[in-house]
Image: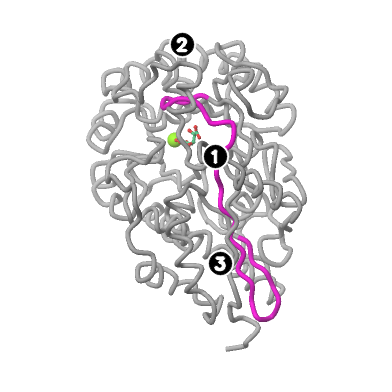
Amino acid sequence: MDSALIVEEVQLTPILISDPPLLNTQGVHQPYTPRLVVEVVTRGGVTGLGETYGDGKYLDLARPLAGAMPGRPVTDVNGLFSLAERVCGDSRAVDGRVDAGGLRGAQTADKLRLSVVSAFEVACLDALGKTLGLPVHALLGGKVRDRVEYSAYLFYRWDAHPVGGEADDWGAALDPAGIVEQARRFDRTYGFRSFKLKGGVFPPEREVAAIRALAEEFPGRPLRLDPNGAWSVETSLAVARELKDVLEYLEDPASGTDAMAEIAARADVPLATNMCVTTFEEVPEAFARDSVRIVLCDHHYWGGLHRTRELAALCRTYGVGLSMHSNTHLGISLAAMTQVASTLPRLDHACDTHHPWQSEDVVTARPLFEDGRLAVSDAPGLGVELDRDRLAALHRRWVEDDGAMRDRDDAAAMRVADPGWRTPEVPRW
Ligand SMILES: O=C([O-])C(=O)C[C@H](O)[C@@H](O)C(=O)[O-]
Ligand SMILES: [Mg+2]
């Protein structure tokens, strides 16, 4: 093995990035949210970048993995999985039911570990690509499209956080008119064609009215509604009936494969998920029961870019559509999503991205969406460059935080405005 491809060291930098007051069924986004930046440095002097969730439970797993990396070739991305199993141990704070935010399906030790491995895999691929002078998509077999389509991610939101946080000029969006106004700005600024509304915030009739208002403003455009499993089967069926003429799909209307299978059997709207199919173990039952028509892959919790391609092959085989889920993420992960998305033969739905909500980043150039699409970079690696000053500043914020923001907790953030708030039981409606 060429010694230039051997890992010399791995740097982990936890950061806090500003996040607007976006509402979901659990509560509201904190003013600052944790992310972890992973840098894999080779003996050849090349640095590969990766990014993942930055809460303490991810950091606990990332540290031993980083310590075990020196001396290994960056080409050995398949070996990362067994390495992580060996060195990471089980994370604290795994309850086996739902993730802390309640938005990403079952939380298991495997899924937490895979979310960490994903950042190391992406960083190794970035380092390998930079060393060889090849884009990451070439390392995945080559791109089959030059641009990747994303959708606008609409949120009910407050004008500002009740305490702290960075100001922005989006204004509040708490009714159909506010959501339509937000969609207009996404359309104008980024050219997004599809719109996804994060639901589960208000009683379903109000969210149905917002989707109707969007359909009126943007006739024929793909529309999605995602209450993160907050509804009962009967409520989901009623919403599906109301909106069947305008929805591209309904995303996780209810929690769990049983409920999703029942809705799928009785509704005329396709169902999508990033909650009931989030691991390979969950695929057989969900597909056998026709619970979902579209899986929203998230390369973080599926374990990286190669695993995303494995999921894509499974979905193709079973006639299930594939798209991508997104959480608060930065330009490194957006570049990784775009690289892998460019290699997937079937990608029938615009991918989600939160990125337009992120005013801060650790990469030097902001992504340029045109007609709702990102051009696929052919530069070596991921095609993004680290802004070390920004990284240092965002890390300083993490160091100086008293611990309140270091673990994302949307219910705790909501209690700042509403002290009686408790994480809602599902079904909420
Ligand atoms: O289901 C989804 O698409 C998400 O959970 C995406 C994000 O987590 C979003 O809901 C959020 O951050 O509030
Ligand atoms: Mg979702």
Residue 208 image label: none
Q: Where is residue 225 in the image (x, y as percent from the top left)?
A: 46, 26
Distance CA(mark 3)–CA(mark 2) = 44 Å
Instruction: Kindly indicate the quadrant of the structure image that contains residue 37.
Output: bottom right
Q: What element carries label 1?
A: loop
Asked if the magenta segment contains residue 125, the reply would be no
Q: Residues within 10 Å of mark 1 (few under 14, many from 20)?
A: few
Residue indicated by mark 1: 402
Q: Which residue is drawn at 61% across and 10% down?
A: 177
Q: Can residue 200 be seen in this view?
A: yes
The total number of labels drawn is: 3
Mark 3 lies within 8 Å of ligand 1 (Cβ measured): no
Mark 3, secondary structure of its residue: loop
Count residues near mark 3 (Cα–Cα under 10 Å), then give few for <14, some for 14-19, many for 20+: some
Q: What residue type is labelled 2?
A: Arg
Residue at mark 3: 140
- Tell me the magenta residue range: 23-49
- Image: 145 above or below 379: above
